[in-house]
Image (cartoon, rainbow, N blue to C red):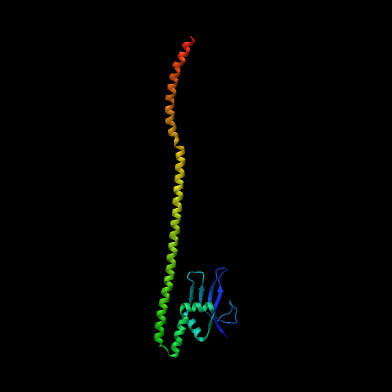
């Protein structure tokens, strides 16, 4: 019986999640399996890969063949590196303590890189949000300034009313002068008719 380490799909349409399972290679993708060792969620950034590394290592050492996707995950999490070191111990090339030290150092380095990526993504997301907020504020200020300019233009159009009152005050004086000038002219025409 050929044993595979592969993904079994679950989750709704366009939001897939996968179980990492140990299954007979002849069974269907989402069908019968021997053991579930973890989950994989590609919807998150970075993708969430959670599985029992010890069980995966045991199955790999027993001869289970991972699919390409699962092989990439196992390599990403260090299971294949651990297998490589263990084969060196079996052959007598290195001691078990040396293999454990190398694996621990590699694991700490890899975890630091993963955490660094998470924090950089979070920081980049916050910076992008701040830039969008600054752009929105700039647009809002520009709109407010345009509205103020428009209101000032409307006020300026309505403002000539006080200027018109000043002209009205001058106009009666001018009318009075013309009326007085017209009155002597009228008197002289009356005298001429008499």
Q: In this rendering, does residue 98 appear at all? A: yes
Residue at position x 44%, y 21% in the image: 178
Front-most of residues 40 and 159: 159
Q: In the rendered view, would you say 111 is above or below 193?
A: below
Determine the image quadrant of residue 105: bottom left
Is 124 on the left-hand or right-hand side of 68?
A: left
> What residue occupies the far bottom of the structure in this picture?
92
Residue at position x 50%, y 84% in the image: 60
Q: Measuring from the top left, give residue 176's x and y in whole percent.
A: 43, 22
Q: Measuring from the top left, give residue 37's x and y in whole percent.
A: 51, 79
Residue at position x 45%, y 62% in the image: 128
Q: In this rendering, does residue 20 appear at all? A: no
Q: Measuring from the top left, give residue 90's x and y in whole percent.
A: 45, 89
Q: In the rendered view, would you say 25 is above or below 131?
A: below
Q: Measuring from the top left, give residue 52's x and y in whole percent.
A: 48, 79
> What residue occupies the far front of the structure in this picture?
192
Q: Tell me the quadrant of the picture where the N terminus can be found.
A: bottom right
Count of numbered badges drawn on the protein: 0
> What residue occupies the far top of the structure in this picture?
194
Q: In the rendered view, would you say 153 is above or below 124?
A: above
């Amino acid at each position: 019986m050929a044993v595979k380490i592969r993904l079994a799909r679950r989750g709704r349409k366009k939001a897939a999640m996968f179980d990492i399972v140990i299954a007979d290679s002849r069974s269907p993708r989402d069908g019968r399996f021997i053991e579930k060792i973890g989950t994989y969620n590609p919807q998150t950034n970075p993708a969430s890969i959670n599985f029992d590394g010890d069980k995966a290592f045991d199955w790999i050492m027993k001869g289970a063949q991972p699919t390409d996707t699962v092989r990439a995950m196992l390599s990403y999490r260090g299971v294949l590196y651990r297998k490589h070191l263990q084969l060196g111990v079996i052959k007598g090339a290195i001691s078990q303590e040396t293999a454990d030290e190398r694996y621990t150092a590699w694991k700490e380095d890899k975890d630091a890189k993963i955490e660094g990526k998470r924090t950089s993504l979070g920081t980049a997301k916050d910076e992008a949000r701040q830039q969008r907020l600054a752009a929105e504020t700039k647009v809002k200020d520009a709109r407010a300034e345009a509205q103020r300019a428009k209101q000032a233009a409307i006020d300026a159009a309505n403002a000539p009313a006080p200027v018109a009152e000043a002209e009205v005050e001058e106009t009666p004086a001018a009318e009075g002068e013309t009326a007085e000038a017209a009155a002597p002219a009228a008197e002289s025409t009356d005298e001429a008719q008499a």
